[in-house]
Image (cartoon, rainbow, N blue to C red):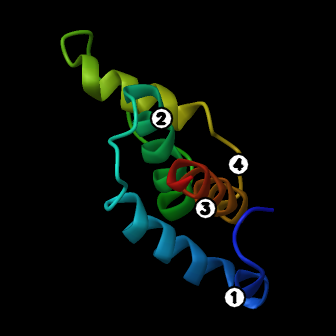
Amino acid sequence: MTGSAADAGTPLNERFQRAVAESKMLSERPDNATLLELYALYKQATAGDVDGKRPGFTDLVGRAKWDAWNALAGTSSDDAMQRYVDLVERLKD
């Protein structure tokens, strides 16, 4: 697991909330694929499996977001939170 030794005793939800805040203050903007991964992990962690229909072919951004989130179907909230925290830690390096 990434993060500092001080994070070891911190509840996952607190580390997740801190990672969400840190993701908005990264020194460099992540590439689009990484942004989609962050979006999908955040949505899976906070809302669970994707709900609703896939956006139409004219909504390319909406489709990409839906597809990224849908790829995580069945992933637990805790697993998505941990993966989000780990990804933000890698992006901070």
Q: In this orientation, which residue lies closer to the viewer: 48 or 12?
A: 12
Q: Which residue is mark 4?
A: 75
**Residue 51 x, y percent position in the rendering:** 45, 43
Instruction: Give the Cα separation between the discs numbered 3 and 1.
Output: 12 Å
The mark that comes first in sequence, 3 or 4, is: 4
Q: Which amino acid, by three-letter code, is at mark 3?
A: Val
The alpha-carbon separation of the residues under discs 4 and 1 comes to: 22 Å
Q: Quadrant of the N terminus?
A: bottom right
Depth check, mark 3 against mark 4: the one in front is 3
- Rendered position, 82 above or below 36: below
Q: Earlier in the sequence, mark 3 or mark 1?
A: 1
Residue 13 higher or lower than 82, as above or below:
below
2 and 3 marks in contact (CB < 8 Å): no
> In the rendered view, does 43 fall on the left or right side of 85?
left
Residue bearing mark 3 = 85
| Mark 4 residue type | Thr
CA distance for labels 3 and 4: 15 Å
Q: Earlier in the sequence, mark 2 or mark 1?
A: 1
Image disc number at residue 34: 2
- Three-letter amino acid code of the residue under disc 2: Thr
- Numbered disc in front, either 4 or 2: 2
Percent x, y for residue 2? 74, 62
The mark lying in front, picked from 4 and 1, is: 1
Q: Which residue is mark 1?
A: 10
